[in-house]
Amino acid sequence: MRLENKITIITGGAGGIGLGIATAFAKEGAIVAIVDLNQQAGEEAIKKLQAISPNSMFIQADLSDTQALPSIVDQVIKAYGKLDVLVNNAHASRMKSFEDLTQEDFDFSFNTGFYPTFYLMQAALPHLKETKGTVINFASGAGLNGDVHQASYAAAKEAIRAITRVAANEWGQYGITCNLISPIALTPGVEQWAAAHPDTYQAMLDKNPLGRLGNPEADIGRTAVFLASEDANYITGQTMMVDGGSIKLR
């Protein structure tokens, strides 16, 4: 129980990687507050999580509403009295060629990914100071590689990487660690994409040294558990590539 009674906020926690992380945290004793726009998915997810961690909760919220973001942290503090871990996982974007991208496309990506990450970090900071807590944000190979048709997503992800490194430098004095995970995982969305584009999916697997996509709980979730645990107290400002070796940072 490496995360026993650690109060954790996980955005996008009702499915995919977010639910995988929430499940891994709950199994290690954490109390998780999953945040998601999808009310039905959130209610279904929290039932599963409460079977493991009974005091966990679901908060329905539109992360693109920046004025509402501080209330997420407020609700968690009111319910539990503290905050130990903030996991900014949620992000949405549109795939378009560079020449077809619009300001609206960039706004959509930044408003669902970058700005929620930034404002939730700001709101969480006073409470993370008290617990010497942890921030886990999400990068992407799309930003590191410059994947085609991913300019708005890649730009937001690299912006998230930048502010995470700045926070690591500024917040280290408080004992707060700030790191990133850059994952590849077999989520329901990826499964749908693979079914529609089997040749492209196989080509991606062929380039992966381990020959598979990660499991949201066992691979991505367990890495997040490590970063939130005492085992990672001396790691900050880093991008953890949890992608089967697809990208090797230098």
Image (cartoon, grey):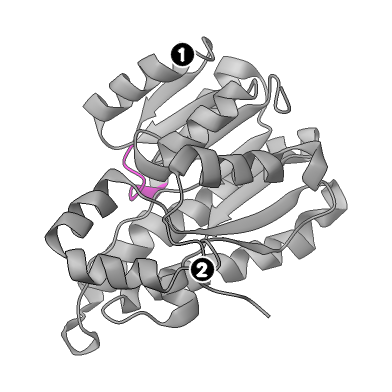
Which residue position holds label 1?
A: 50
Q: Is residue 235 above or below residue 44?
A: below
Taking the spot 44% from the left edge, 30% from the top edge, the residue there is 34
Report helix, strand or loop for mark 1. helix
Kindly check if marks 2 and 1 are in contact, taking CB atoms under 8 A apart as contact.
no
The amino acid beneath tag 1 is Gln
* Bounds of the magenta segment: 61-66
Quarter location, residue 39: top left
Q: Is residue 127 above or below residue 156?
A: above
Taking the spot 60% from the left edge, 71% from the top edge, the residue there is 162
Q: Quadrant of the N terminus?
A: top right
* Front residue of 48 and 172: 48
Taking the spot 58% from the left edge, 22% from the top edge, the residue there is 27
* Front residue of 169 and 230: 230
Q: Is residue 171 magenta?
A: no
Report helix, strand or loop for mark 2. loop
Which residue position holds label 2?
A: 209
Instruction: Answer few, some or many: residues within 10 Å of disc 1's Cα (few below 14, many 20 plus, some between 14 and 19).
Output: some
Q: Is residue 63 magenta?
A: yes
Left or right: residue 146 versus residue 97 is right
